[in-house]
């Protein structure tokens, strides 16, 4: 039944796409002539979108122009679009390790070492006769004694089967663009985008673990309660945080652009749903701060030459450009704040380990979403060979920050494991916290059951979470968090953990034992809950550019040099301990960009080349604090911190080129991102365009975050499972 429902959902998704394309073809046949082939390529939101007008001499009756021209003599419209299947085939025998079925501990037997709360979770449990008689009797009645001690070790195997997908990504995409000119000053641009994904990946369904530990109960059921939800973005208290977007688990339809444009003399006013792109840096985002990114589809692994034109999250905005004089233009905007959209759990390019449940507070953190506005001003000028720009932006950081949060899941620790065996530690905790009398070992005197206490903590006793201390430390390092301090903040920020006998760990050995104690007591695993919040910040930045002059045809002739930088005082970062006291640091981001068209042969068109260098003082390309860098799986027993951090900031180098062939049917591309800490992304690509309607593109993503050194010191290791070949076939009309 569930499979049939999924099929109906998939077929409905593709029905929407077919309807859109059918409508487009019908409209074209009814009077709109074919557009210029390149008119539907993603345009920079920094410029006015352009499409190609239908033939002015075509039948005005069939096109509808006759009626509207009777009311508005200057009325005209343009229409274009494309349909494009895209698929990415994995070339590496690995799935996303942040997903349940890509978890590196799936099917691996791990020995857990519970500790003793009476000795600060030392490595061995003492004789039980130190406990009060009623407590001792409760524990001994529920557990087999071995010389008066609870068994010290147990073995757990993560009960989720690993998978190896052949396809990382396969979608059908359609896009339609309508431009309407009402007068010489007023026009409308509407771009509609529809995407469908049939699914059929070897992925995880939460229903498969419903019989373990009572199943997964926390989190939004649309996201955490069943099969992966590929496209819906839901936040706490709101199922539609993105205006002008309709989405289901396997499809999404939205307007990346729907705005009125008024242009009169030096003034241009744009009102409606739109993207705003600033800055000159390619691939790097320095001055490009107005919009967040949509990472639901292909994350940041798309065609590098398209930059972020397909990724910026559109938002309702008012944007005003004013040409002050021939050299200087002012550009200002006010927009509704829209967050960066992360991939949902268990989707191919998910960035948050699925052992943790996200509670997105975009709508429920004290402000209604429509009250959150971002605004900014840019001045840009050109003075001969020189150019300059300045920006000042007040915005909510769209990436958000994370902290531990209460689960609100009232579920007792199990006294019996899923296999029917006695859960000694779970039974002991339930006996100590019976909801009637205080835990005799806890001085606070708080009364509650283990379920009531856990509901007020950041942990839920449910399957699909973290099963062992080994897994905990591995994934903490992977996402650039501190495994020791993260545990301690998950305790000290939540007083309800006291009656459960949780206490801050003094070192790695104690943290390891305490984690194994509570994973064992949970009857399998604990799922952590984190809240995502958003904070206002001020971005101040500027850039200068210079075009060199040299001997004609030389490498130094017409070389464009750009330098851009932004400074953010008191930026709020996720703390590596996930505590409620976020990091606040001044952050500087700077990039040097050199680009050039160079002709190496009279037989070939000029080659476009770009070389870039970026430096960030406090974070990496994903906005993660460098204080969480450098984690490992294991530490010395007396270690009190798990992450040394990365000193001196982060640095990145990009080199890219495009080489058209003589007949312009073929084009070769290459892009490379190098992290000097030991990671590299290389993307060779080829583009074939035999005529104006058809385009075939193929590119290969090679990622290696383990060139040398600790892989948790470079940004590439986050994605290096995703080696893949992507092929796209486009039909434009």
Image (cartoon, rainbow, N blue to C red):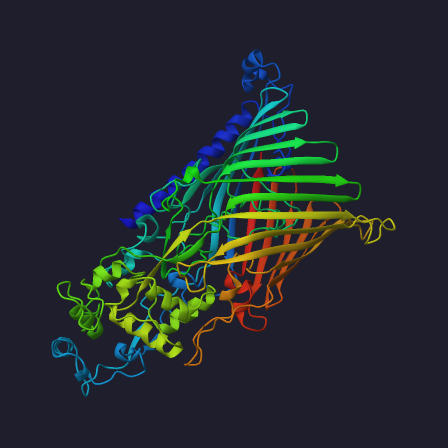
- The residue most toward the top is 70
- Which residue corresponds to the image point at 57% horizontal and 46% vertical from the top-left? 289
**Quarter of the rendering containing residue 592:** bottom right
- Please say whether residue 681 is visible from this viewpoint: yes
- x and y, in percent, of residue 636 in the image: 44, 81
Q: Where does the C terminus fall, quadrant-wise?
A: top right
- Which residue corresponds to the image point at 38% horizontal and 59% vertical from the top-left? 354
**Quarter of the rendering containing residue 103:** bottom left
Instruction: Determine whether 405 is above or below 645 in the image.
Output: above
- In the image, 491 versus 54, the foreground residue is 491
- In the image, 702 versus 582, the foreground residue is 582
- In the image, 594 versus 583, the foreground residue is 583
- Which residue corresponds to the image point at 22% horizontal and 57% vertical from the top-left? 410
Instruction: Determine whether 200 is above or below 385 in the image.
Output: below
- x and y, in percent, of residue 594 in the image: 73, 53
- x and y, in percent, of residue 159 in the image: 31, 67
Left or right position of 497 against 321? left
- x and y, in percent, of residue 303 in the image: 59, 50
């Amino acid at each position: 039944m569930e499979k049939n429902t999924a099929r109906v959902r998939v077929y409905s998704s593709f029905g929407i796409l077919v309807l859109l394309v059918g409508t487009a073809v019908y409209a074209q046949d009814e009077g709109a002539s074919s557009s210029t082939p390149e008119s539907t390529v993603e345009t920079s939101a920094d410029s006015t979108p352009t499409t190609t007008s239908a033939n002015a001499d075509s039948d005005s009756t069939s096109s509808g122009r006759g009626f509207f021209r009777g009311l508005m003599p200057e009325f005209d419209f343009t229409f274009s679009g494309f349909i494009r299947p895209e698929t990415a085939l994995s070339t590496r025998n690995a799935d996303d390790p942040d997903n349940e079925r890509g978890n590196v501990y799936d099917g691996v037997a791990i020995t857990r070492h519970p500790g003793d709360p009476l000795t600060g979770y030392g490595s061995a449990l003492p004789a039980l006769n130190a406990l009060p008689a009623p407590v001792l009797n409760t524990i001994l009645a529920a557990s087999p004694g071995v010389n008066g001690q609870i068994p010290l070790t147990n073995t757990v195997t993560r009960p989720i089967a690993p998978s190896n997908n052949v396809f990382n990504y396969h979608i059908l995409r359609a896009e339609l663009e309508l431009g309407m000119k009402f007068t010489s000053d007023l026009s409308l641009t509407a771009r509609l985008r529809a995407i469908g994904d049939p699914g059929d990946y070897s992925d995880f369904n939460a229903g498969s673990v419903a019989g373990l530990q009572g199943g997964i109960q926390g989190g939004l059921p649309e996201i955490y309660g069943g099969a992966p939800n590929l496209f819906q973005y839901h936040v706490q208290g709101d199922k539609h945080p993105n205006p002008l977007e309709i989405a289901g688990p396997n499809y999404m339809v939205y307007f990346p652009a729907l705005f009125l444009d008024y242009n009169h003399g030096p003034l241009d006013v744009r009102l409606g749903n739109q993207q705003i792109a600033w800055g000159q840096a390619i691939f790097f985002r320095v001055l490009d701060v107005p919009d967040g990114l949509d990472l639901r589809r292909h994350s940041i692994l798309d065609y590098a030459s398209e930059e972020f034109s397909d990724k910026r999250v559109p938002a309702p905005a008012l944007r005003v450009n004013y040409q002050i004089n021939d050299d200087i233009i002012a550009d200002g905007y006010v927009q509704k704040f829209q967050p960066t959209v992360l991939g949902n759990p268990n989707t191919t390019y998910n960035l948050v380990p699925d052992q943790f449940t996200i509670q997105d507070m975009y709508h429920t953190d004290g402000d209604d979403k429509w009250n959150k506005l971002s605004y900014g001003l840019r001045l840009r000028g050109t003075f001969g060979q020189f150019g300059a720009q300045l920006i000042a932006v007040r915005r909510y950081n769209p990436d958000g920050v994370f902290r531990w949060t209460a689960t609100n899941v009232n579920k007792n620790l199990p006294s019996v494991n899923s296999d029917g065996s006695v859960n000694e530690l779970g039974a002991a905790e339930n006996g100590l916290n019976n909801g009637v009398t205080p835990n005799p070992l806890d001085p606070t005197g708080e009364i509650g059951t283990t379920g009531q206490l856990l509901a007020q903590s950041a942990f839920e006793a449910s399957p699909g979470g973290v099963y062992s201390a080994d897994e905990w430390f591995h994934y903490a390092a992977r996402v650039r968090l501190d495994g020791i301090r993260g545990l301690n903040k998950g305790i000290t920020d939540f007083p309800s953990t006291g009656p459960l006998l949780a206490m801050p760990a003094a070192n790695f050995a104690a943290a390891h034992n305490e984690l194994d104690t509570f994973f064992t007591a949970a009857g399998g695993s604990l799922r952590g809950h984190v809240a995502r919040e958003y904070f206002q910040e001020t971005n101040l930045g500027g850039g200068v550019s210079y075009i060199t002059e040299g001997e004609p045809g030389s490498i130094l002739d017409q070389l464009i040099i750009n330098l851009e930088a932004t400074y953010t005082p008191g930026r709020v970062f996720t703390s590596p301990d996930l505590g409620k006291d976020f990091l606040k640091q001044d952050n500087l981001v700077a990039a040097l960009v050199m680009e050039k068209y160079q002709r190496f042969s009279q037989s070939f068109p000029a080659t476009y080349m770009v070389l870039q260098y970026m430096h960030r003082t406090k974070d990496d390309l994903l906005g993660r604090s460098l204080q969480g860098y450098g984690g490992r799986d294991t530490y010395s027993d007396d270690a009190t911190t798990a992450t040394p951090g990365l000193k001196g900031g982060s640095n990145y180098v990009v080199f890219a080129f495009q080489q058209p062939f003589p007949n312009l049917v073929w084009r070769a591309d290459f892009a490379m991102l190098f992290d000097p800490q030991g990671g590299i992304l290389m993307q060779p690509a080829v583009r074939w365009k035999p005529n104006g309607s058809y385009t075939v593109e193929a590119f290969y993503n090679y990622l290696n975050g383990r060139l040398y050194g600790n892989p948790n010191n470079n940004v590439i290791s986050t994605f290096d499972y995703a080696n893949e070949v992507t092929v796209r076939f486009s039909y434009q009309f």
